[in-house]
Amino acid sequence: MKEEVLNNKRIAVLLSGGVDSSVVVYEFARLGLHPDCFYVKIGPEENEEWDCSSEEDVEMATAVAHKYGCKLEIVDCHREYWDQVTRYTMEKVRAGLTPNPDVMCNRLIKFGAFHEKRGHDYDLIATGHYAQTETDENSLKWLTTSPDPVKDQTDFLAQIYDWQLKKALFPIGHYMKDEVRQIAEREHLVNARRKDSQGICFLGKINYNDYLRRYLGEQKGDVIELDTGRKIGEHRGHWFHTIGQRKGMGFGGGPWFVVKKDVEQNIIYVAHGYDPDSAYSQTFKIRDFHSLNGKHPDELVTFKIRHTPDFFKARLEQQGNGCYMLHSETRIHGVAPGQFCVVYDEQHHRCYGSAEIAL
């Protein structure tokens, strides 16, 4: 984070209550800056029956903002979250797809609804994401990966708009997670030892299947072994299961892998064994490619389809209208329609953007 870049800039920090965004505030404070901090509320209403950690989050955020002499404002975006991100999630799941709500939360809420309410008053919006940016010789801003492959979050940011990327700032993106923890311990931050949040960004202790059940209910259907056509049991709704899943099936004689869905007939097809061939794909189509800065990928790329440290090499075959056929060098487990395929350069340094997998 270059001090000269920040001179005379109006900076907003999205302060979640977690250790990462708290160290962001410290990074500004050590430069003598006191940015305005915002806690973006996206959890359920206070009278919801679901347990939510937002009260503790606000307490942590308040303590950190006070420590560094920053203002903290709570911006309520929970209605926008439930209207936009939840609608996206349920429409995709009902259609038999595998969505990623956290990806759309960044586009629609953290850099979207927040911007409409307060962010438009600021030149830069800083978050605790493990990601970096760089500007090329043509003054084009790129999203680039963090040196921490486990924590790198460029995949969660690969659907934001170009104007959002231009305003985005990631002050801890050059650190390893252990370094961030060490800074928090050294600075005696109240949340230095707080565990990282897991799962969908607002759910807290809410079970994801309960979240789906609330909106989609249950609908019994058959579970059929793909190779034999034999019915091995029933499920309570295809939306509770994802392609590649092997846990929580509840059938004897396993293990069983979900390998296919028939949404119209509400049938789930499974394969037997610990590593069935039918659980893998090597060539698949991606559609509606979203470029982060207007640049589309070269033929040879690296990619990932889920939040893991692993990048895979591939060749892209352009098909027009933002569609590509992706030919991976290695077989990929659990490729599911609706997942985002995030595309990087050959060195998995610059992120081009992402596209939805279409099988």
Image (cartoon, rainbow, N blue to C red):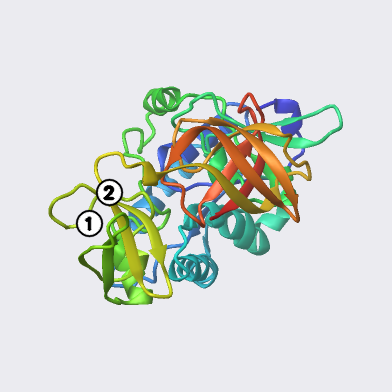
The structure residue drawn at horizontal position 36% and vertical position 33%, both measured from the top left corner, is 192
* 145 left or right, relative to 238: right
Element class at badge 1: loop
The structure residue drawn at horizontal position 31% and vertical position 54%, both measured from the top left corner, is 227
Amino acid type at image mark 2: Arg
Evaluate whether residue 70 shows in this view: no
* 238 left or right, relative to 299: left
Dot 1 alpha-carbon crowd within 10 angstroms: few under 14, some 14 to 19, many 20 or more: some
Residue 313 lies in quadrant: top right
Residue 240 locus on image (x, y percent)? 32, 64
Which quadrant holds the N terminus?
A: top right
Please give the residue where the numbered disc 1 appears in the rendered image: 249
* Mark 2 and mark 1 residues within 8 Å of each other at the beta carbon: yes
* 116 and 161: which is toward the camera: 161
Evaluate whether residue 147 shows in this view: yes
Q: Is residue 52 above or below residue 1?
A: below
* 303 left or right, relative to 318: left
Element class at badge 2: loop
* Tally of numbered tags: 2
Residue located farthest toward the right when viewing the structure as drawn: 138
Please give the residue where the numbered disc 2 appears in the rendered image: 246
